[in-house]
Image: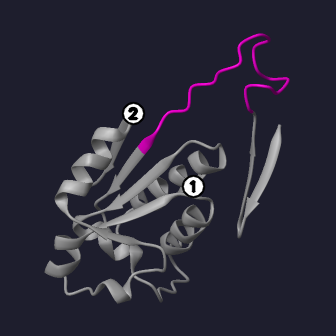
Amino acid sequence: MFRRKVKSHTFIYFDSNSAAATPGKVSTLRKKFTFIIATPPYDKTGAFTAARVGLTAMMEELPTTIILMEDGVYCGVKGQHSTQFFQVVQVLQDFMEAGGKLLVCGLCIKERGIGAENLIEGAEVIDIHRLVNTMKESDQTVFFGA
């Protein structure tokens, strides 16, 4: 069992060498995940769930990329402070601190009047070709949208 802390999140998880694992079954397979968030941060819990799952995957040392597109790009706008909703932006910052990649659809931010300078530090603006290549390189892509 391991305990890791990234900012405000503490994760306790079992790895393949822990007592809870099946003896003799050590897995060396590391899947590569891509999560696409297409919902805004304060609409439903889908964006928060995707960010939290992405952070947890990174804590378990699984290479993970989160792509923000459509209204999901609002999740990556810096300076958000809500007391009534989950802090998706904080989870995304923790995700990147843990080594995760945060990619943001360039056309999506342009159409919404969001400049790249308004995104949280570490977010990378991409085009559709990079989006497709990221999905192609992943073992599994999960879409969180309406």
Residue 138: give x, y in percent of width and height: 37, 39
Label 1 Cα neighbours within 10 Å, binned few <14 / some 14-19 / many ≥20: many
Label 1: element kind: helix
User: Is any atom of residue 35 visible in this view?
Assistant: yes
Residue 121: give x, y in percent of width and height: 48, 80
Q: Quadrant of residue 47?
A: bottom left
**Label number found at residue 55:** 1
The stretch in magenta equals 15-33
Label 2: element kind: loop
Q: Please give left or right for residue 69 compared with residue 141 in the image.
A: left
Q: Nearer the viewer, residue 12 or 141?
A: 141
Identify whether 135 is placed above or below 111: above
Q: Nearer the viewer, residue 82 or 8?
A: 8
The residue pinned by badge 2 equals 139
Residue 119: give x, y in percent of width and height: 39, 81
**Label number found at residue 96:** none
Q: Residue at x 14, y 79 (%)?
A: 111
Identify whether 137 is placed above or below 3: above
Mark 2: amino acid? Asp
The stretch drawn in magenta includes residue 38: no
Q: Please give left or right for residue 33 compared with residue 115 in the image.
A: right
Label 2 Cα neighbours within 10 Å, binned few <14 / some 14-19 / many ≥20: few
